[in-house]
Image: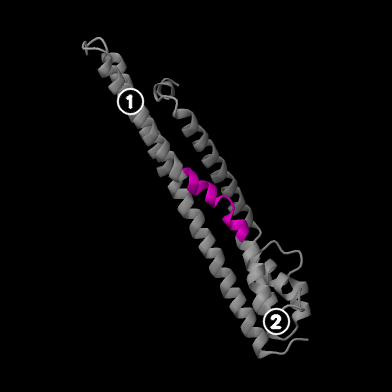
């Protein structure tokens, strides 16, 4: 608490940014753990096998109720025969990818804003220091205010940089999982398109 108080008024927005970032990271970690627990690669393969035999209706039914995001995307695409596969597959995939993208923009903003708030704290701290220097000729009498301004600048900057650094690791992990999900959906969509091209639907 002493460190927080000596950091100056900019520590409050920095604290808010850190709270938002931690909340997003925890929520995304729970989301990824839940998504991993409901993956059903066998169900995805079953959908592709039925589609390869030309049974699109059976393939669509096989994916109903699945928690696997790939199976859901394939099922959504197959469940709308009135639309072409080329248009329905990207739409279904984008809906699933949107779930993986949630929170990334907020976390990116936190990573960018935290160091900037720290720099703003540096500026206000140095302004206090220079104000103390110009307040009088007796530097020794103003030594406490001078060192306090420098400490405020350093604390705010260190906290802002620390938050950005800590948040950078989960942000990169989340982006990697988003890319993995995008590749999985693209591979499954390509396999489904090939299967439907080789065998007529019934």
Residue at the (51%, 54%) spot, across then down: 174
Which of the numbered marks, if any, corresponds to residue 51? 2
Tell me where residue 117 appears, x and y as whole percent: 42, 36
Magenta segment, which residues?
98-110
Magenta segment includes 105: yes
Magenta segment includes 196: no
Answer with the quarter of the image where residue 159 lies.
top left
Mark 1 or mark 2, whichever is nearer to me? 1
User: Badge 2: how crowded within 10 Å, few (<14), some, or many (20+)?
Assistant: many
From this view, report whether residue 115 is shown above or below residue 10: below
Would you say residue 193 is visible in this rendering? yes
* Along the viewing direction, whichever of 40 and 12 lies nearer the viewer: 12
Which of the numbered marks, if any, corresponds to residue 127? 1
Query: Does 107 sit left or right of 199 as displayed?
Result: left
* Along the viewing direction, whichever of 191 and 154 lies nearer the viewer: 154
Instruction: Assign a secondary structure to mark 2.
Output: helix
User: Badge 1: how crowded within 10 Å, few (<14), some, or many (20+)?
Assistant: some
Q: Tell me, what colour scheme is on the image?
A: one colour
Q: Earlier in the sequence, mark 1 or mark 2?
A: 2
From this view, report whether residue 58 is shown above or below residue 38: below
Residue at the (54%, 39%) spot, across then down: 20
């Amino acid at each position: 608490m002493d460190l927080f108080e000596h950091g100056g008024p900019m520590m409050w927005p920095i604290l808010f940014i850190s709270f938002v970032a931690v909340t997003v990271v925890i929520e995304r970690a729970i989301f990824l753990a839940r998504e991993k627990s409901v993956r059903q690669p066998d169900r995805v393969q079953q959908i592709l096998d039925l589609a390869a035999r030309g049974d699109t209706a059976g393939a669509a039914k096989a994916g109903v109720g699945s928690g696997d995001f790939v199976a859901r995307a394939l099922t959504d695409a197959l469940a709308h025969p009135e639309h072409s596969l080329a248009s329905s597959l990207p739409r279904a995939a984008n809906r699933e990818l949107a779930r993986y993208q949630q929170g990334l923009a907020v976390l990116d903003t936190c990573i960018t804003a935290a160091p900037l708030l720290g720099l703003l704290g540096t500026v206000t701290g140095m302004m206090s220091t220079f104000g103390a220097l110009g307040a009088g000729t007796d530097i020794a009498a103003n030594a406490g205010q001078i060192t306090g301004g420098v400490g405020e600048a350093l604390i705010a900057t260190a906290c802002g940089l620390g938050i950005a650094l800590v948040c950078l690791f989960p942000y990169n992990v989340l982006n990697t999982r988003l890319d993995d999900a995008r590749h999985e959906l693209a591979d499954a969509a390509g396999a489904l398109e090939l299967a439907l091209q080789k065998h007529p639907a019934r």
